[in-house]
Amino acid sequence: MPHRMPLYYVAQTQSFEPTPKSMETPVLNEIRLLEGNFNSNHPDREWEARSDFSARCFTPLAASPPLPATALTLGSRIISKGLGWENFEVPYVLIPTGYEEWATEILNKHSLNLKGDEPGTDYLYGAIFCSLGKYLVAPCLLKSLLERWDPHTNTFVFPRGERTITLLDMHKMAGLPIEGEIYDEFIPQDDQLDPSLLLYPKVLSILLEKWRALELKGEMSFQDWCNHFHNSQEGLSGFEGDESVLLYKAAFLALWLCCFAIIGGGPNIRPSVLVMASWMALGRRYALAQPALCSLYYSLRIISTDPIGPAHSKRPWPIHYLIGWMGIYLKSIFDEKTRNPRPFSCPYPSKRPVLLSTIFRTPKYFNPKDAHAFMCQDRKLLWYAYRPRNVINNPHTPSDSDKKAFYLWVRRGMLPWRRATFNENFCIIEPYHPERVARQFRLYQVVPYAPFRNLITKKDVGVSYAFWEQLLHPVKDLHPFPNELRFGILSLLWVHSHLKFVKPFRSILERLSDGNIYGSVNIADQMDKYKNRVPKGLNPRDLDSDDLTLVRKVPQQRQQQFILSVENQLTAIDEPWKKVLYGLLGIQTDFASGSDQHISQNHEEGSASHPVLIENPSAQENLMDNQVIAPGANNGKRQLSPASSEKEKEPPAKRSINFSVENEVNSSAQLPIDSEQQSIHNSEAHMAAPAKVSGLGRLNKAYIDVTKQTLSETFAGLDASTLRDPSLRSELSAIAEELPENIPALFEVKQRLIQLIAVSGRLQLADNEFKHASEQNEVHIASTKQELASLEETIKVSVRDRQMIAAKCSEQEKLVASLTAQLNAATQELESFKKEEEQLNKVYSEQEANVQKCNGILDGATNSFNAANLEFQAKIDRLEQESTDLFKTLEK
């Protein structure tokens, strides 16, 4: 079931990799370009050329003209489709009652692994702190900005350039990490949740069990979740100490991820987010800026492509990021800073996200015309919102880490957000085009590349692994860094292309100035027409050639090499965390490297792969580098404090581990049967050792006898094959939990049992891995056999086709020969006909001459006849006159 597997495993069956060219991006160079600018004073020419300059920009330069040729904004759709903003309300996310108190409790008491590794750095503390406030905006100003959103480029379109929310903004503004492990939402299979398998934290199975128990029609509301784990703390009942702290912390992180950091799926806890929250509670670090920005882009796509209207969708979306971005890039949209800001009962983050500058600010009022006029004034909008000192520690000599972060911000690519459910794989992938907004990074603006196309997929979710690899790939060659003194220069080619790009949108700006509250089409008719129709671009689809620009399918001959590479990468990431999970099982051992009880942090490789183990997490959580403000009354809630002094005498729940040969076999897959039987024999032998029986000792002896009998029955028939049985391991775990630790004879037995349980878990894990590998090999062999059979059948068909073609060729050759003979005969006949035609033409010419001669004679005869006829008629007329005269004479 791929939807119940981590992305690393999905990638092994759906193999995609970044193209070599995409791994080299971004490439910044200094080249000579002709500078250009807008010319608002010239009515006939809106641009002006200037001298050439040395530009720090993306290379190679994009082909001209750029695509798309014109902007396709939401405002353009509103005018062309007759849409309106009926029933629009600012879609603020409803934070559940009790959230602020819960977040404050986490930041005050359980924030150790939420902070940075060095003074002045941060991981999630600042991002969680940002969720404590409210962010408000003027509705008309928000609508005017949304009308400029182009879902094809994921940018806001303005007359003098494009702007957008970038990864730089998500990091600097919201405090979200841009580096770390791949963020991957999925729901593991139930048989993989056993803690002894060392695959997932034990708290994950608890959270999933709670979610299933509380969900209603497949949904778990924010408020019900908050009530269960914090307001009533019913969800913590039955859990104590470190386990209670981890559960409390993981439940909060799940809520924070769903209602503030990465919003999607309505006002509900996504069950797929629980695996991320469980690991993050232990200190595992993930790159959150990319999926958070993807969720924002996806929300803006839904709004700007809804066929019914931009206000039709009532789903919550991360509008706080957009409001914070507006407060940073748009001048004077809020009233003066609050004089008496709302106090927080937890310390401010050592590295404050810029989003805090807009917290609890009162927005200025804008009517539709004022908002439209504001957006049309370029001087009201900033291009680069962060001062150099806020971006790098030393403006003159930026460090490699500063450059590394910068090149991750400006790397164009696709932002993946996997959201697998209980039943299906699902992944949203949004394009990211920093080259279109180069001035926001203090770079020079040149003609941008053709934009990528968004992707929603259920079938090819493995492609998101390749997109993640391309986004997080470290930059080997740190190219030129932006100039802090001179930036934002435009190339003349870009000015020309942008004027064409924005021209259709500029032509409708005046028609957007009245706010378009009501469209020309009836919204009820639109709802009936598009009732069950999903807008184009929001339907899951198959991959095509346009999607394989940054990534490609792994060739068949490199499949095994690719799978091995992914497995090695997964092993390198998971192994340190398996040690953490191993330690949480309560085994008293030491690391093979010595008595040091921590795994040292490696800042170059990132904290995600190198966790820190702490002897007493609940006690160490209070060691904050800031001054902690004492919390108020507990309101009757059970305090999640360190264990009492009596419990401190017990062995710690979390211990450092020794993977040396004396305490554990290095590879459970090659564990000799003798070693397991020896462990069992040692346990039995220790129980059979004589003990002094007196007073309480008789009770201890009785308890030991009963335990010995129980273990003897359990150990009957136990060997390496039965040790893999999960039910047997559960039985051993139950026995180990029941064994007291205050009886010395049983304490060692309990520790050996725990070791045996751990070996059993590793055996099952190895067995599962072997089965998984065997299944993959079988699938590969079956696929290869199928391909071979297909090739053989293809060869047979090819042979038959070749024979048929040869026969047809022979027939055609005969036909060609016959036709050639016929052609020759026809050619001779044609020549004979031509000669006859010449003779006939000659005879015809002679006859035609005779005809003309006869016509001449006939014309002469006709003329003579006509003349004689006229003469004869004249004579008749005279005779008739004479006869008439004679008659008149006779009558007299």
Image (cartoon, rainbow, N blue to C red):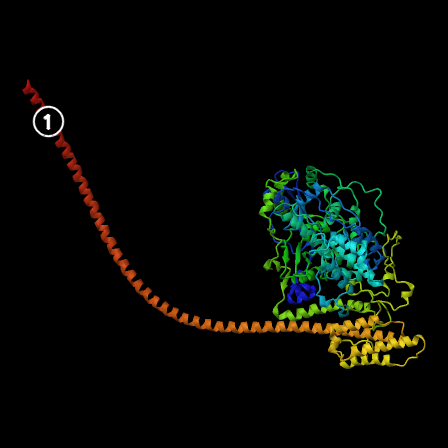
Examine the rendered structure and indicate whether residue 70 appears above or below residue 1.
Answer: above
Residue 751: x, y in percent?
84, 74
Element at label 1: helix
Please say whether residue 384 is visible from this viewpoint. no
Vertical order, 361 against 592 (above or below) = above
Name which quarter of the figure residue 454 lies in: bottom right
> Is residue 557 rendered to the left or right of residue 881?
right
* Side (left or right) of 338 relative to 782: right
Answer above or below: position of 202 versus 407.
Answer: below
Q: Can residue 576 be seen here?
A: yes
Q: Residues within 10 Å of mark 1 (few under 14, many from 20)?
A: few
Residue 461, horizontal then vertical, whole percent: 65, 61
Give the quadrant of the C terminus.
top left
Measured as percent of width and height from the top left, residue 399 is found at 79, 58
Question: Count of labels shown?
Answer: 1
Res 769 quadrant in image: bottom right
Residues 304 and 730: in front is: 730
Determine whether, in the image, residue 833 is placed left or right of residue 101: left
Image quarter hosting the N terminus: bottom right
Q: Which residue occupies the extreme right position in the image?
A: 695
User: Which residue is the extreme one toward the top?
Assistant: 892
Q: Amino acid at mark 1?
A: Glu
Q: Residue at x 15, y 32 (%)?
A: 870
Residue 659 picture location, percent across and down:
81, 74
Q: Is residue 80 left or right of residue 404?
A: left
Observer-nearest of 266 and 221: 221
Between 332 and 208, the one lying in front of the other is 208
Report the residue marked by disc 1. 880
Q: What residue is rendered at 23% in x and 48% in y?
A: 848
